Amino acid sequence: MKEPLDLIIRDGSVVLCNDVRRMDIGIHNGRIVQLAERLTTPAKQSVLASGMIVMPGMIDAHVHLNEPGLGAWEGFTSGSSALAAGGCTTYIDMPLNGIPPTVTVAALQQKLAAAQGKSIVDYALWGGLVPGHLDDLRALDEAGVIGFKAFMSSPGDPSEDAFREVDDATLLAGMKIIAELGHVLALHAESEPIVAALTKEKLAKGAISAADYTASRPVRAELEAVNRALLFAEQMGCALHFVHISSADAVQTIANAKQRGVDVTLETCPHYLVLTDRDLEQIGPAAKCAPPLRSKSEQEKLWAMLAAGHIDMIASDHSPCPSELKQSDNYFTAWGGIAGAQNSLELMIDEGYTKREIPLPVLSRMLSFAPAKRFGLSDTKGEIRLGADADLVMLQLDAPYTLEAQLLYHRHKHNPYIGRKFGCRVMATWSRGNMVYEVKRGIAQPFAGQWLSGAPACAKQQV
Protein backbone atom coordinates (compact mmCIF):
# COMPACT_ATOMS: atom_id res chain seq x y z
CA MET A 1 0.00 0.00 0.00
CA LYS A 2 1.65 3.24 -1.15
CA GLU A 3 -0.15 5.85 0.93
CA PRO A 4 -0.14 5.64 4.73
CA LEU A 5 -2.99 4.08 6.62
CA ASP A 6 -5.36 6.41 8.41
CA LEU A 7 -5.18 4.45 11.65
CA ILE A 8 -3.60 1.38 13.20
CA ILE A 9 -5.08 -0.08 16.39
CA ARG A 10 -2.11 -1.97 17.80
CA ASP A 11 -1.69 -5.03 19.96
CA GLY A 12 -5.28 -5.57 21.02
CA SER A 13 -6.93 -8.90 21.73
CA VAL A 14 -9.08 -8.90 18.61
CA VAL A 15 -12.36 -10.81 18.63
CA LEU A 16 -12.79 -12.58 15.29
CA CYS A 17 -15.59 -14.90 14.20
CA ASN A 18 -14.17 -18.03 15.77
CA ASP A 19 -11.29 -16.98 18.02
CA VAL A 20 -9.45 -14.13 19.73
CA ARG A 21 -6.03 -13.10 18.45
CA ARG A 22 -3.51 -10.52 19.59
CA MET A 23 -2.97 -8.42 16.48
CA ASP A 24 -2.98 -5.04 14.73
CA ILE A 25 -5.86 -3.60 12.72
CA GLY A 26 -5.04 -1.32 9.78
CA ILE A 27 -7.76 1.13 8.70
CA HIS A 28 -8.02 3.28 5.58
CA ASN A 29 -10.97 5.21 4.14
CA GLY A 30 -13.24 3.83 6.84
CA ARG A 31 -12.52 0.16 6.10
CA ILE A 32 -10.35 -2.54 7.62
CA VAL A 33 -7.59 -3.08 5.06
CA GLN A 34 -4.91 -4.94 7.00
CA LEU A 35 -4.91 -7.51 9.82
CA ALA A 36 -1.63 -8.91 11.08
CA GLU A 37 0.26 -9.78 14.22
CA ARG A 38 2.44 -6.74 13.62
CA LEU A 39 1.83 -4.09 10.95
CA THR A 40 4.79 -2.09 9.63
CA THR A 41 2.82 0.06 7.19
CA PRO A 42 3.09 3.80 7.99
CA ALA A 43 -0.03 5.31 9.52
CA LYS A 44 -1.24 8.82 10.23
CA GLN A 45 -2.40 7.75 13.67
CA SER A 46 -1.80 4.85 15.99
CA VAL A 47 -3.75 3.72 19.08
CA LEU A 48 -2.20 1.25 21.51
CA ALA A 49 -4.72 -1.37 22.62
CA SER A 50 -2.42 -3.58 24.71
CA GLY A 51 -4.38 -5.32 27.43
CA MET A 52 -7.67 -4.36 25.75
CA ILE A 53 -10.36 -6.32 23.95
CA VAL A 54 -11.19 -5.04 20.46
CA MET A 55 -14.57 -6.22 19.15
CA PRO A 56 -16.89 -5.40 16.27
CA GLY A 57 -19.17 -2.56 17.31
CA MET A 58 -22.54 -3.72 18.56
CA ILE A 59 -25.45 -3.65 16.09
CA ASP A 60 -28.52 -2.83 18.16
CA ALA A 61 -31.51 -3.94 16.10
CA HIS A 62 -34.12 -2.62 18.52
CA VAL A 63 -34.14 0.98 19.74
CA HIS A 64 -36.86 3.63 20.01
CA LEU A 65 -35.47 7.13 19.54
CA ASN A 66 -38.95 8.66 19.25
CA GLU A 67 -38.41 11.14 16.43
CA PRO A 68 -40.24 12.75 14.78
CA GLY A 69 -42.85 14.10 17.14
CA LEU A 70 -41.51 13.03 20.53
CA GLY A 71 -37.89 14.11 20.29
CA ALA A 72 -38.26 15.55 23.79
CA TRP A 73 -38.42 11.93 24.94
CA GLU A 74 -35.09 11.08 23.27
CA GLY A 75 -34.06 12.04 19.74
CA PHE A 76 -31.32 10.93 17.38
CA THR A 77 -28.59 13.12 18.89
CA SER A 78 -28.87 11.96 22.51
CA GLY A 79 -29.90 8.40 21.63
CA SER A 80 -27.06 7.77 19.19
CA SER A 81 -24.60 9.34 21.65
CA ALA A 82 -25.66 6.87 24.34
CA LEU A 83 -25.33 4.00 21.88
CA ALA A 84 -21.83 5.10 20.80
CA ALA A 85 -20.72 5.45 24.43
CA GLY A 86 -21.89 1.89 24.94
CA GLY A 87 -19.90 0.51 22.01
CA CYS A 88 -22.74 0.41 19.47
CA THR A 89 -21.85 1.44 15.93
CA THR A 90 -25.11 0.69 14.09
CA TYR A 91 -28.70 0.71 15.29
CA ILE A 92 -32.14 0.07 13.79
CA ASP A 93 -34.84 2.45 14.98
CA MET A 94 -38.31 0.96 15.53
CA PRO A 95 -41.61 2.82 15.36
CA LEU A 96 -43.36 3.21 18.67
CA ASN A 97 -43.70 6.62 20.33
CA GLY A 98 -42.75 8.83 17.37
CA ILE A 99 -45.67 10.78 15.93
CA PRO A 100 -46.37 10.03 13.15
CA PRO A 101 -45.21 6.41 13.39
CA THR A 102 -43.26 5.03 10.44
CA VAL A 103 -46.20 3.40 8.67
CA THR A 104 -46.19 5.61 5.55
CA VAL A 105 -43.51 6.92 3.23
CA ALA A 106 -44.30 10.47 4.35
CA ALA A 107 -43.63 9.49 7.96
CA LEU A 108 -40.42 7.71 6.93
CA GLN A 109 -39.25 10.85 5.16
CA GLN A 110 -39.97 12.91 8.28
CA LYS A 111 -37.89 10.50 10.34
CA LEU A 112 -35.03 10.63 7.84
CA ALA A 113 -35.12 14.42 7.91
CA ALA A 114 -35.00 14.36 11.72
CA ALA A 115 -32.01 12.01 11.65
CA GLN A 116 -30.02 13.88 8.99
CA GLY A 117 -26.77 15.12 10.55
CA LYS A 118 -27.98 14.17 14.05
CA SER A 119 -26.70 10.59 14.45
CA ILE A 120 -23.13 9.90 15.45
CA VAL A 121 -23.23 6.28 14.20
CA ASP A 122 -24.91 4.52 11.27
CA TYR A 123 -28.57 3.60 11.38
CA ALA A 124 -31.36 1.79 9.57
CA LEU A 125 -35.12 2.15 10.02
CA TRP A 126 -37.95 -0.29 10.58
CA GLY A 127 -41.32 0.28 8.97
CA GLY A 128 -44.56 -0.56 10.76
CA LEU A 129 -47.33 -3.06 10.12
CA VAL A 130 -50.60 -1.66 11.54
CA PRO A 131 -54.29 -1.92 10.63
CA GLY A 132 -55.32 0.35 7.78
CA HIS A 133 -51.88 0.61 6.22
CA LEU A 134 -51.37 -2.64 4.33
CA ASP A 135 -51.21 -0.69 1.08
CA ASP A 136 -48.21 1.24 2.42
CA LEU A 137 -45.95 -1.79 2.89
CA ARG A 138 -44.71 -1.96 -0.69
CA ALA A 139 -44.03 1.77 -0.82
CA LEU A 140 -42.09 1.60 2.44
CA ASP A 141 -40.07 -1.28 1.01
CA GLU A 142 -39.18 0.79 -2.04
CA ALA A 143 -38.31 3.74 0.20
CA GLY A 144 -35.68 1.70 2.05
CA VAL A 145 -36.94 0.29 5.36
CA ILE A 146 -34.91 -2.61 6.71
CA GLY A 147 -37.98 -4.67 7.62
CA PHE A 148 -41.32 -4.31 9.39
CA LYS A 149 -42.42 -4.29 13.04
CA ALA A 150 -45.79 -5.25 14.52
CA PHE A 151 -47.26 -5.46 18.01
CA MET A 152 -49.50 -8.37 18.96
CA SER A 153 -50.45 -6.53 22.17
CA SER A 154 -51.28 -2.89 22.80
CA PRO A 155 -48.25 -0.56 22.61
CA GLY A 156 -49.79 1.45 25.42
CA ASP A 157 -50.38 4.86 23.83
CA PRO A 158 -54.12 5.59 23.50
CA SER A 159 -53.63 8.35 20.92
CA GLU A 160 -55.29 7.71 17.56
CA ASP A 161 -52.09 8.85 15.83
CA ALA A 162 -49.89 6.39 17.73
CA PHE A 163 -48.61 2.98 16.68
CA ARG A 164 -51.33 0.32 17.01
CA GLU A 165 -51.35 -3.45 17.52
CA VAL A 166 -52.37 -5.77 14.69
CA ASP A 167 -55.48 -7.93 14.59
CA ASP A 168 -55.12 -11.45 13.18
CA ALA A 169 -56.50 -10.52 9.76
CA THR A 170 -53.98 -7.67 9.39
CA LEU A 171 -51.17 -9.90 10.62
CA LEU A 172 -51.93 -12.62 8.08
CA ALA A 173 -52.36 -10.19 5.20
CA GLY A 174 -49.23 -8.29 6.19
CA MET A 175 -47.19 -11.48 6.40
CA LYS A 176 -48.23 -12.39 2.88
CA ILE A 177 -47.03 -9.05 1.51
CA ILE A 178 -43.83 -8.99 3.57
CA ALA A 179 -42.99 -12.52 2.37
CA GLU A 180 -43.41 -11.37 -1.24
CA LEU A 181 -41.09 -8.43 -0.54
CA GLY A 182 -38.41 -10.70 0.95
CA HIS A 183 -38.31 -8.81 4.24
CA VAL A 184 -38.40 -9.86 7.88
CA LEU A 185 -41.33 -9.14 10.20
CA ALA A 186 -40.31 -8.30 13.76
CA LEU A 187 -42.94 -9.10 16.36
CA HIS A 188 -43.71 -8.04 19.91
CA ALA A 189 -45.33 -11.30 20.95
CA GLU A 190 -47.72 -11.03 23.88
CA SER A 191 -51.37 -12.09 23.74
CA GLU A 192 -53.53 -8.98 24.08
CA PRO A 193 -56.64 -10.95 25.19
CA ILE A 194 -54.70 -12.63 28.02
CA VAL A 195 -52.91 -9.45 29.11
CA ALA A 196 -56.06 -7.31 28.91
CA ALA A 197 -58.16 -9.76 30.92
CA LEU A 198 -55.56 -10.17 33.67
CA THR A 199 -54.96 -6.42 33.82
CA LYS A 200 -58.68 -5.75 34.17
CA GLU A 201 -58.88 -8.33 36.95
CA LYS A 202 -55.98 -6.75 38.88
CA LEU A 203 -57.26 -3.20 38.54
CA ALA A 204 -60.75 -4.21 39.66
CA LYS A 205 -59.17 -5.33 42.94
CA GLY A 206 -57.00 -2.23 43.26
CA ALA A 207 -53.93 -4.42 42.86
CA ILE A 208 -51.29 -2.08 41.39
CA SER A 209 -47.96 -3.31 42.78
CA ALA A 210 -44.90 -4.47 40.88
CA ALA A 211 -45.86 -8.09 41.53
CA ASP A 212 -49.39 -7.43 40.27
CA TYR A 213 -48.07 -5.93 37.04
CA THR A 214 -45.72 -8.87 36.51
CA ALA A 215 -48.56 -11.35 37.11
CA SER A 216 -50.70 -9.61 34.50
CA ARG A 217 -48.20 -10.49 31.75
CA PRO A 218 -47.32 -14.15 32.40
CA VAL A 219 -45.11 -16.39 30.29
CA ARG A 220 -48.21 -18.03 28.83
CA ALA A 221 -49.17 -14.69 27.22
CA GLU A 222 -45.80 -14.69 25.43
CA LEU A 223 -46.11 -18.36 24.49
CA GLU A 224 -49.61 -18.03 23.03
CA ALA A 225 -48.57 -15.14 20.80
CA VAL A 226 -45.36 -16.87 19.69
CA ASN A 227 -47.23 -20.05 18.73
CA ARG A 228 -49.91 -18.12 16.85
CA ALA A 229 -47.33 -16.06 14.94
CA LEU A 230 -45.34 -19.17 14.00
CA LEU A 231 -48.49 -20.85 12.69
CA PHE A 232 -49.33 -17.81 10.56
CA ALA A 233 -45.75 -17.46 9.31
CA GLU A 234 -45.60 -21.09 8.22
CA GLN A 235 -48.80 -20.61 6.26
CA MET A 236 -47.63 -17.37 4.64
CA GLY A 237 -43.95 -18.18 4.18
CA CYS A 238 -42.95 -15.05 6.06
CA ALA A 239 -39.56 -14.63 7.74
CA LEU A 240 -40.01 -13.75 11.43
CA HIS A 241 -37.90 -12.13 14.10
CA PHE A 242 -39.22 -12.18 17.66
CA VAL A 243 -38.15 -9.19 19.73
CA HIS A 244 -37.35 -9.15 23.48
CA ILE A 245 -38.18 -12.80 24.21
CA SER A 246 -38.21 -13.19 28.00
CA SER A 247 -38.79 -16.90 28.69
CA ALA A 248 -36.98 -20.17 28.06
CA ASP A 249 -40.23 -21.84 27.00
CA ALA A 250 -40.69 -19.30 24.22
CA VAL A 251 -37.05 -19.74 23.14
CA GLN A 252 -37.55 -23.52 22.97
CA THR A 253 -40.77 -23.12 20.97
CA ILE A 254 -38.94 -20.94 18.44
CA ALA A 255 -35.99 -23.35 18.32
CA ASN A 256 -38.39 -26.21 17.55
CA ALA A 257 -39.89 -24.17 14.71
CA LYS A 258 -36.41 -23.60 13.28
CA GLN A 259 -35.81 -27.34 13.28
CA ARG A 260 -38.88 -27.91 11.15
CA GLY A 261 -37.74 -25.27 8.67
CA VAL A 262 -39.42 -22.04 9.73
CA ASP A 263 -37.37 -18.96 8.83
CA VAL A 264 -37.28 -17.40 12.29
CA THR A 265 -34.85 -15.69 14.65
CA LEU A 266 -35.15 -14.20 18.10
CA GLU A 267 -33.54 -11.68 20.36
CA THR A 268 -33.51 -11.22 24.09
CA CYS A 269 -32.41 -8.16 26.02
CA PRO A 270 -29.75 -7.62 28.68
CA HIS A 271 -32.37 -6.66 31.27
CA TYR A 272 -33.91 -10.15 31.15
CA LEU A 273 -30.46 -11.63 31.73
CA VAL A 274 -29.30 -9.41 34.61
CA LEU A 275 -32.49 -8.18 36.33
CA THR A 276 -35.41 -10.08 37.89
CA ASP A 277 -38.91 -9.38 39.15
CA ARG A 278 -37.38 -8.70 42.57
CA ASP A 279 -35.35 -5.90 40.99
CA LEU A 280 -38.53 -4.35 39.63
CA GLU A 281 -39.88 -4.22 43.20
CA GLN A 282 -36.65 -2.71 44.55
CA ILE A 283 -35.73 -0.32 41.71
CA GLY A 284 -39.24 0.79 40.84
CA PRO A 285 -40.82 1.72 37.48
CA ALA A 286 -37.42 2.50 35.93
CA ALA A 287 -37.22 -1.29 35.55
CA LYS A 288 -40.74 -1.71 34.15
CA CYS A 289 -40.94 -3.23 30.67
CA ALA A 290 -43.13 -5.51 28.60
CA PRO A 291 -42.80 -8.45 28.73
CA PRO A 292 -41.92 -7.93 32.40
CA LEU A 293 -38.81 -9.04 34.21
CA ARG A 294 -39.06 -12.70 35.20
CA SER A 295 -38.04 -14.74 38.24
CA LYS A 296 -34.47 -15.72 39.06
CA SER A 297 -35.17 -19.34 38.07
CA GLU A 298 -36.62 -18.21 34.74
CA GLN A 299 -33.56 -16.03 34.20
CA GLU A 300 -31.21 -18.97 34.77
CA LYS A 301 -33.13 -21.01 32.20
CA LEU A 302 -32.77 -18.14 29.73
CA TRP A 303 -29.00 -18.10 30.26
CA ALA A 304 -28.95 -21.86 29.63
CA MET A 305 -30.76 -21.30 26.34
CA LEU A 306 -28.23 -18.64 25.40
CA ALA A 307 -25.28 -20.88 26.24
CA ALA A 308 -26.86 -23.68 24.18
CA GLY A 309 -26.98 -21.44 21.11
CA HIS A 310 -30.75 -20.99 20.91
CA ILE A 311 -30.74 -17.17 21.22
CA ASP A 312 -29.72 -15.46 18.00
CA MET A 313 -29.01 -11.93 19.11
CA ILE A 314 -29.04 -9.36 21.89
CA ALA A 315 -30.78 -5.98 21.57
CA SER A 316 -31.39 -3.21 24.09
CA ASP A 317 -35.02 -2.34 23.34
CA HIS A 318 -34.02 1.17 24.46
CA SER A 319 -37.41 2.70 25.20
CA PRO A 320 -37.00 6.01 27.02
CA CYS A 321 -39.47 8.55 28.36
CA PRO A 322 -39.45 11.69 30.52
CA SER A 323 -38.60 10.81 34.11
CA GLU A 324 -41.91 12.06 35.48
CA LEU A 325 -43.74 9.31 33.57
CA LYS A 326 -41.87 6.75 35.69
CA GLN A 327 -42.85 8.36 38.99
CA SER A 328 -45.94 6.45 40.09
CA ASP A 329 -46.90 3.94 42.73
CA ASN A 330 -49.28 2.38 40.21
CA TYR A 331 -47.20 0.01 38.12
CA PHE A 332 -49.94 -0.20 35.50
CA THR A 333 -49.96 3.55 34.78
CA ALA A 334 -46.19 4.15 35.06
CA TRP A 335 -44.69 4.24 31.58
CA GLY A 336 -43.12 0.96 30.50
CA GLY A 337 -39.72 0.76 28.84
CA ILE A 338 -36.09 0.44 29.91
CA ALA A 339 -33.56 3.08 28.88
CA GLY A 340 -30.54 0.81 28.44
CA ALA A 341 -28.91 1.82 25.14
CA GLN A 342 -25.57 2.63 26.75
CA ASN A 343 -25.22 -0.51 28.84
CA SER A 344 -25.92 -3.55 26.64
CA LEU A 345 -22.41 -4.48 25.56
CA GLU A 346 -20.82 -3.94 28.97
CA LEU A 347 -23.55 -5.98 30.66
CA MET A 348 -23.15 -8.87 28.25
CA ILE A 349 -19.35 -8.95 28.49
CA ASP A 350 -19.37 -8.57 32.27
CA GLU A 351 -22.16 -11.05 32.97
CA GLY A 352 -21.70 -13.36 29.99
CA TYR A 353 -17.93 -13.57 29.53
CA THR A 354 -16.34 -12.60 32.85
CA LYS A 355 -18.85 -14.28 35.18
CA ARG A 356 -20.26 -17.12 33.06
CA GLU A 357 -17.27 -17.80 30.74
CA ILE A 358 -19.24 -17.66 27.51
CA PRO A 359 -16.58 -17.18 24.81
CA LEU A 360 -16.16 -13.70 23.38
CA PRO A 361 -16.71 -14.85 19.75
CA VAL A 362 -20.06 -16.35 20.80
CA LEU A 363 -21.16 -13.10 22.44
CA SER A 364 -19.85 -11.07 19.51
CA ARG A 365 -21.93 -13.14 17.14
CA MET A 366 -25.09 -12.28 19.07
CA LEU A 367 -24.17 -8.62 19.51
CA SER A 368 -22.88 -7.90 16.01
CA PHE A 369 -22.68 -10.60 13.35
CA ALA A 370 -26.15 -12.14 13.69
CA PRO A 371 -28.09 -8.84 13.40
CA ALA A 372 -25.89 -7.77 10.49
CA LYS A 373 -26.59 -11.01 8.65
CA ARG A 374 -30.29 -11.23 9.46
CA PHE A 375 -31.11 -7.66 8.46
CA GLY A 376 -29.01 -7.38 5.32
CA LEU A 377 -25.99 -5.46 6.64
CA SER A 378 -23.37 -8.22 6.59
CA ASP A 379 -21.61 -7.09 3.40
CA THR A 380 -19.73 -4.46 5.41
CA LYS A 381 -20.73 -4.80 9.05
CA GLY A 382 -20.86 -7.18 11.97
CA GLU A 383 -17.34 -8.63 12.11
CA ILE A 384 -13.67 -7.77 12.05
CA ARG A 385 -12.38 -8.85 8.65
CA LEU A 386 -10.69 -7.37 5.60
CA GLY A 387 -13.03 -5.09 3.68
CA ALA A 388 -15.47 -4.56 6.53
CA ASP A 389 -16.34 -1.14 7.87
CA ALA A 390 -14.01 -0.17 10.70
CA ASP A 391 -16.83 -0.21 13.26
CA LEU A 392 -14.98 -1.15 16.41
CA VAL A 393 -15.16 -0.98 20.18
CA MET A 394 -12.25 -1.21 22.62
CA LEU A 395 -13.01 -2.53 26.11
CA GLN A 396 -10.97 -2.95 29.24
CA LEU A 397 -12.02 -6.06 31.13
CA ASP A 398 -10.58 -5.23 34.53
CA ALA A 399 -11.97 -1.72 34.81
CA PRO A 400 -14.63 -1.72 37.53
CA TYR A 401 -16.80 1.37 37.85
CA THR A 402 -20.15 2.28 39.31
CA LEU A 403 -22.71 3.71 36.90
CA GLU A 404 -23.88 7.18 37.89
CA ALA A 405 -26.62 9.20 36.24
CA GLN A 406 -24.19 11.86 35.03
CA LEU A 407 -22.34 9.24 32.96
CA LEU A 408 -25.43 8.55 30.85
CA TYR A 409 -25.81 10.23 27.46
CA HIS A 410 -29.48 9.53 26.82
CA ARG A 411 -31.80 12.47 27.40
CA HIS A 412 -33.65 11.50 30.59
CA LYS A 413 -31.33 10.06 33.22
CA HIS A 414 -33.45 7.29 34.70
CA ASN A 415 -32.00 3.83 34.27
CA PRO A 416 -32.32 0.55 36.22
CA TYR A 417 -28.52 0.12 36.27
CA ILE A 418 -27.68 3.36 38.11
CA GLY A 419 -25.68 2.34 41.17
CA ARG A 420 -24.66 -0.97 39.61
CA LYS A 421 -20.97 -1.91 39.63
CA PHE A 422 -19.76 -2.88 36.16
CA GLY A 423 -16.63 -5.02 35.85
CA CYS A 424 -15.60 -3.86 32.38
CA ARG A 425 -15.78 -0.58 30.48
CA VAL A 426 -15.97 0.70 26.93
CA MET A 427 -12.84 2.79 26.44
CA ALA A 428 -13.34 3.88 22.81
CA THR A 429 -15.69 3.42 19.87
CA TRP A 430 -14.91 3.89 16.17
CA SER A 431 -17.50 4.31 13.42
CA ARG A 432 -16.06 3.82 9.92
CA GLY A 433 -12.60 4.39 11.37
CA ASN A 434 -13.46 7.65 13.13
CA MET A 435 -13.32 7.72 16.92
CA VAL A 436 -16.81 8.76 18.01
CA TYR A 437 -16.37 8.12 21.73
CA GLU A 438 -13.44 8.02 24.12
CA VAL A 439 -13.92 7.48 27.83
CA LYS A 440 -11.85 10.46 28.93
CA ARG A 441 -13.12 12.93 26.34
CA GLY A 442 -16.66 11.73 25.75
CA ILE A 443 -18.58 12.03 22.48
CA ALA A 444 -16.66 13.35 19.46
CA GLN A 445 -17.88 15.58 16.64
CA PRO A 446 -19.15 15.68 13.96
CA PHE A 447 -22.32 13.60 13.83
CA ALA A 448 -21.72 11.79 10.55
CA GLY A 449 -23.72 8.57 10.90
CA GLN A 450 -25.13 7.30 7.61
CA TRP A 451 -28.57 5.89 6.79
CA LEU A 452 -28.37 2.25 5.67
CA SER A 453 -31.19 1.64 3.22
CA GLY A 454 -32.89 -1.75 3.36
CA ALA A 455 -31.69 -4.74 1.36
CA PRO A 456 -34.49 -7.34 1.33
CA ALA A 457 -32.60 -9.90 -0.74
CA CYS A 458 -30.05 -10.18 2.07
CA ALA A 459 -32.48 -9.81 4.92
CA LYS A 460 -33.79 -13.38 4.77
CA GLN A 461 -30.43 -14.97 5.54
CA GLN A 462 -30.64 -17.32 8.49
CA VAL A 463 -28.12 -16.84 11.27
Image (cartoon, rainbow, N blue to C red):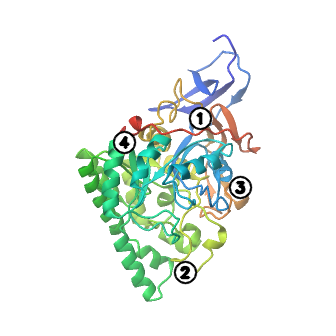
Which residue is tagged 4?
181
Q: Which kind of residue does numbered mark 4 sit on?
A: Leu
Q: In the picture shown, does residue 108 fall above or below 132?
A: above
> Dot 4: few (<14), some (14–19), or many (≥20) neighbours within 10 Å?
some
* Contact (Cβ within 8 Å) of mark 2 with mark 1: no
Measured in 3D between alpha carbons, the distance from the residue under mark 2 to the one under mark 1, in whole angstroms, is 42 Å
* Contact (Cβ within 8 Å) of mark 1 with mark 3: no
* Contact (Cβ within 8 Å) of mark 4 with mark 2: no
Q: Closer to the camera: disc 1 or disc 3?
A: 1
The picture places residue 283, in percent across and down from the top left corner, at: 58, 71
Q: How many marks?
A: 4
Measured in 3D between alpha carbons, the distance from the residue under mark 4 to the one under mark 2, in whole angstroms, is 43 Å
For the residue pair 256 and 231, the one nearer the viewer reads as 231
Q: Which kind of residue does numbered mark 1 sit on?
A: Asp
Residue 418 can be seen in this image: yes
Which residue is tagged 2?
330
Q: Which kind of residue does numbered mark 3 sit on?
A: Leu
Q: Closer to the camera: disc 4 or disc 2?
A: 4
Measured in 3D between alpha carbons, the distance from the residue under mark 2 to the one under mark 3, in whole angstroms, is 29 Å
Q: Closer to the camera: disc 2 or disc 3?
A: 2
Q: Residue at x 69, y 23 (%)?
A: 6
Q: Residue at x 54, y 77 (%)?
A: 333
> Dot 3: few (<14), some (14–19), or many (≥20) neighbours within 10 Å?
some
Measured in 3D between alpha carbons, the distance from the residue under mark 1 to the one under mark 4, in whole angstroms, is 29 Å
Which residue is tagged 3?
407
Instruction: For mark 3, give the secondary structure.
Output: helix
